[in-house]
Amino acid sequence: MNSTNRTVVVTGIGATTPLGGDSASTWEGLLAGRSGARLIDDERFADLPVKIAALAAVDPSEVLPRPLARKLDRSAQFALIAAREAWADAGFTGPAGEDEQVEPTRLGAVVASGIGGVTTLLDQYDVLKEKGARRVSPHTVPMLMPNGPSANVGLEVNAQAGVHSLVSACASGAEAIGYAMEMIRNGRADVVITGGTEAAIHPLPVAAFANMMAMSKNNEEPQKASRPYDKGRDGFVLGEGAGVIVLESAEHAAKRGARVYCEMLGQGLSADSHHIAQPEPEGRGIAAAMRNLLDSSDLKPQEIVHLNAHATSTPLGDVAEVKALRQVLGDELDHVAVSATKSMTGHLLGGAGGIETVATVLALYHRVAPPTINVDELDEEIDADVVTGKPRPLPAGTVAAINNSFGFGGHNVVLAFRTV
Amino acid sequence: MAATQEEIVSGLAEIVNEIAGIPVEDVQLDKSFTDDLDVDSLSMVEVVVAAEERFDVKIPDDDVKNLKTVGDAADYIAKHQVAK
């Protein structure tokens, strides 16, 4: 049972994002080049320098029954919605054990959030101040703990092989998926449900990110604010939602006749050790993660045809990523169709690795790269083939795609997938 | 005017409906909060706090463990509520 170096495949996907309440509507929005950003209709944001965000297209209160929703932080609500879709999409009809296709002790859950239950924490602090200690919800701790989304998804599917919550700011979702892959590779699990979620659209995080000069202040044209690679980019637009996939050993998937989207080839990890929040301008750490991926997997540079870039729309970060890729891939970068889907979804922080992995998997499955919107004038420092305007078909044959995620703290995660 | 037992039970039913999603008609005197009404120990705290507010009564934590059924809670509230 505990074989190593097992092939890992993707058998299910789910999402709830600023573009749609499931993965199909999200994918449709990505291909259509739709922006999910808008003015936040909430008077608490009236005096903030940033009044825009990419809010979830479908509010979780419309999906989850109220008694369940009131016990879950919004980040866990998104995670649960995306996880339910991914679980059903993988062909499971109930929790492990009840559905005999997977044993509970061979099932893991690894769902990450960058910030955790920040809105619960802040809202309950308001309750404490305004209404007193007795009124603070007894659900506050399980709601605000950063492992809440993972724990709730684990409970939902009856995961007993291990439930984990990796935290690395905006790389959290991708780091979770990489860890999930390792759980299968090293024999701890046959199936792992994994991804990222975030729900941090509250005046405090928005004010804090704005004061870091990290966010776009284009309140006049919200849909044009997130513009990775464009010369006029001025920071990211905060998004919310979740993306979750089901990873499975190839043998397990074959045994139960599961539909396979693609193979998950590997991951590359590194740390900048440069600054707590600034990207290292030459992309040294990103290049190291990319090399690590190439060294530790059988991915060949010539088979990479698509990149879902981290590209958050910040002046420094977008350039450093492309420099790093050019440094490692050289001319092989020329046949990589680069998509910055944050131009449409905004930046979901810990959720980004989740929804962008869903986008990467679908790009390979349907063989089409989504566009990057709002590139009116490509920054000349971006020496890469950015897909703009409309979606671009990807070549036939065996091809691979990578998904980058980097986080405050200098965390770099590169994930790789290949068609089957 | 203190609430009548009927008012207390219908008030508790509305609270349990809000917190646990149980239909109000299912919240009867003999029903156990945990076994019949899907109210776990954390949600029971919510029920208690909502009942305190609604019926102007204090229910100390030490007394909460004795409130197994809707009837237990209704009796407790009827006995301890502050007459208006």
Image: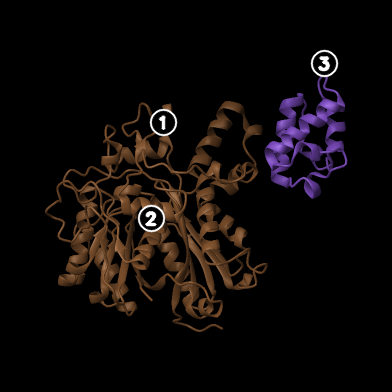
Chain colours: A brown, B purple
Residue, disc 1: A41
Residue, disc 2: A27
Is B78 drawn above or below residue A270 in the view shown?
above
Secondary structure category for the residue under label 3: loop
| Left or right: B28 in relation to A273 | right
- Residue A402 visible in rendering: yes
In percent of width and height, residue A133 lies at 63, 33
Badge 1 vs badge 2, beta-carbon distance below 8 Å: no
Q: Which mark is residue A271?
A: none
Residue nearest the viewer, comparing B42 with A30: A30
Total marks shown come to 3
Closer to the eye: label 2 or 3: 2
Q: Residues within 10 Å of mark 3 (few under 14, many from 20)?
A: few
Q: Residues within 10 Å of mark 1 (few under 14, many from 20)?
A: few
Secondary structure category for the residue under label 1: loop
Read off the chain for label 3.
Answer: B
Residue, disc 3: B1
Screen quadrant of the N terminus of chain B: top right
In percent of width and height, residue A175 lies at 41, 63
Q: CA distance from mark 1 to mark 3?
A: 43 Å
| Left or right: A8 in relation to A212 | right
Callout 1 amino acid: Asp
Q: Residue at x 64, y 68 (%)?
A: A99
Callout 3 amino acid: Met
Q: Residue at x 53, y 31 (%)?
A: A126
Residue sticking out furthest to the left: A380
In percent of width and height, residue B12 lies at 77, 33
Looking at the rendering, which quadrant does residue A369 occupy? Answer: bottom left
Q: Are marks 2 and 3 on the same chain?
A: no
Callout 2 amino acid: Trp
| Left or right: A239 in relation to B27 | left
